[in-house]
Image: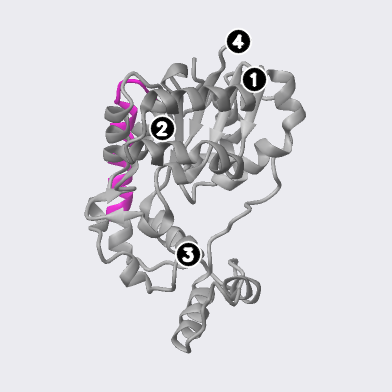
């Protein structure tokens, strides 16, 4: 049985990750023809996710590697390439930022995962996004996973203009030495999703590949967040009573109900400049392939 190439898709959250995952899951037959197997996040969490926690807590690395080899054989099922995808590998939404770090625990989590899978020398891929849009969208997503808190409280432990994708990827690269990285920008995804997919597959995208038609987890509108704040102030558990879904239904993001935007034009200009600086730094990193049209992992 051939040794598969492992691709770890780390997300990030709110970078059209669910759209890509659901598109891969929808096209199992096309992937099968290409010799590619895809393990979606729900299956990853049921099988691989606990291994890095066990390593963190002191379990024997060799036993974990043997378990991982067994899981990989089952998931790959003889295919040349296995894509493992879970945006929670880097961290969970309620604990997204701390001081000047995005995903402050990502270095340890990803490093342990790569060590467990070291027999396969996995490749890593992820998307980044301008923080001016990422942070508000992440706030709406975090409300689905933790008790209600205001946006001001959500960002209170972080220096927003000091956050850096380049610093995050540099830390991941230092924890996963000699690992190939493929990075793309969320803003390029819609126009170039076929090229991005080809890089993940390391092959031409099949003509019959059928992408999911629309984004599966759109961000909350500003009006929906106002409603959630009001309901929470009245003592409602916005998750337990499924009020997030009700707010989305009443005030869907669109022309009538614009997306949540807490930043001033000056703040957004700073985010824009920082994002361009980050992208330039990422492109210059060794072992990192930064996306442009027709980029592929070789």
Task: Say few, some or many: other residues with alpha carbon within 10 Å of mark 2 (under 14 / 14 to 19 / 20 or more).
Answer: many
Q: In the rendered view, would you say 242 is above or below 99?
A: below
What is the magenta segment's predominant secondary structure?
Answer: helix
**Numbered disc 3: secondary structure:** helix
Asked if marks 4 and 1 touch (Cβ < 8 Å), the reply is no
As measured in the structure, the alpha-carbon distance from the residue carrying label 2 to the one carrying label 4 is 22 Å
Tell me if 204 is positioned left or right of 128 in this view: right
| Residue that mark 3 sits on | 140
Which quadrant would residue 164 be assigned to in this image? Answer: top left
Q: Is residue 273 visible?
A: no
Give the label, 1 or 3, closer to the camera: 3
First of labels 4, 3 by sequence position: 4
As measured in the structure, the alpha-carbon distance from the residue carrying label 2 to the one carrying label 1 is 28 Å
Residue drawn at 48 percent across, 85 percent down: 230
| Residue that mark 1 sits on | 204
As measured in the structure, the alpha-carbon distance from the residue carrying label 4 to the one carrying label 1 is 21 Å
| Residue that mark 2 sits on | 113
């Amino acid at each position: 049985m051939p040794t598969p190439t492992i691709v770890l898709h780390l997300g990030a959250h709110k970078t059209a990750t669910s759209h890509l995952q659901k598109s891969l899951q929808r096209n199992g037959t096309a992937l099968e023809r290409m010799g590619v197997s895809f393990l979606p996040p729900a299956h990853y969490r049921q099988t691989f996710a606990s291994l890095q926690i066990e390593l963190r807590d002191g379990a024997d690395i060799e036993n974990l590697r043997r378990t991982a080899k067994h899981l990989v054989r089952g998931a790959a099922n003889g295919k040349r390439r296995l894509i493992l995808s879970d945006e929670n590998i880097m961290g969970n939404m309620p604990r997204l930022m701390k001081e000047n770090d995005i995903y402050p625990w990502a270095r340890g989590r990803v490093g342990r995962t790569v060590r467990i899978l070291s027999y396969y020398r996995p490749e890593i891929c992820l998307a980044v996004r301008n923080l001016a849009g990422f942070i508000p969208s992440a706030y709406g997503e975090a409300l689905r996973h933790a008790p209600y808190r205001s946006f001001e409280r959500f960002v209170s432990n972080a220096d927003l203009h000091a956050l850096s994708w380049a610093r995050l990827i540099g830390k991941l690269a230092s924890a996963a030495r000699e690992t190939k990285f493929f990075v793309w920008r969320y803003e390029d995804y819609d126009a170039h999703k076929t090229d991005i997919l080809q890089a993940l597959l390391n092959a031409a995208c099949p003509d019959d590949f059928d992408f999911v038609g629309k984004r599966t987890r759109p961000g909350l509108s500003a009006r929906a967040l106002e409603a959630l704040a009001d309901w929470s102030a009245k003592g409602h558990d916005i998750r337990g009573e499924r009020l997030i879904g009700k707010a989305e239904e009443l005030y869907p993001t669109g022309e009538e109900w614009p997306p949540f935007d807490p930043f001033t034009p000056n703040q957004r200009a700073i985010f824009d400049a920082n994002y361009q600086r980050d992208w330039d730094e990422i492109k210059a990193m060794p072992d990192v392939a930064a996306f442009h049209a027709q980029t592929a992992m070789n």
